[in-house]
Image (tube, rainbow, N blue to C red):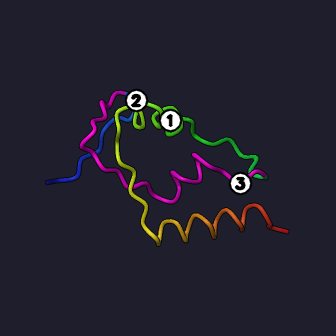
Amino acid sequence: MKNKAHDLANYSFSKDEQLLFDTNVWLCLYPAPSETRSLPVGYSVALKPMLAAGVRLALDVIVMSEYLSSYCRLEFRG
C-alpha cells in the first residue's frame, strides 16, 4: 500500500486504521506546560474523531524518546 497525504480536516477515519504520529504531532497534542508559542490546533481537533472511530494509535519507542527529550528540554530550559 502506498502512503498518501490527506487533508486532516476532511478525512473520514475508520476502525481498521492504525496511525503512527511523529514527535512533532505529540508535542502539539501534549505540549510542555511552559511552551508559550502558538501551536497548530488541527491535530487536537482531529484527535476526537480518530478516537471516536476507534483508530489504533501506534507509538514507536524512538518517537516516545524524542518526545520526552523535547518535552524536558522545553520545560527545563534555563
For this rendering, which residue is in front, 64 or 24? 64
| Residue lying furthest left | 1
Which residue carries the number 1 mark? 42
Q: Secondary structure at mark 3?
A: loop
* Residue at the image point whose x is 43% and y is 54% from the top: 21
Looking at the image, residue 50 sits to the left or right of residue 35; the answer is left
Q: Quadrant of the N terminus?
A: bottom left
Q: Secondary structure at mark 1?
A: helix
Amino acid bearing label 2: Ala
Front label number (3 vs 1): 3
Question: In this picture, which residue range is highlighted in magenta?
Answer: 10-33
* Residue at the image point whose x is 31% and y is 34% from the top: 13
- 13 inside magenta stretch: yes
* Residue at the image point whose x is 38% and y is 57% from the top: 58
Q: Position of residue 25 (x, y in %)?
A: 51, 51
How packed mark 1 is, by other alpha carbons closer than 10 Å (few <14, some 14-19, many 20 or more), is: few
| Residue lying furthest right | 78
**How much space separates mark 2 and mark 1, taking CA atoms?**
7 Å
For this rendering, which residue is in front, 64 or 2? 64
Q: Would you place residue 30 above or below residue 64 in this image?
A: above
Circle nearer the N terminus (2, 3): 2
Circle nearer the N terminus (2, 1): 2
Amino acid bearing label 1: Gly
**How much space separates mark 3 and mark 1, taking CA atoms?**
18 Å
Front label number (2 vs 3): 3
Which residue carries the number 3 mark? 32
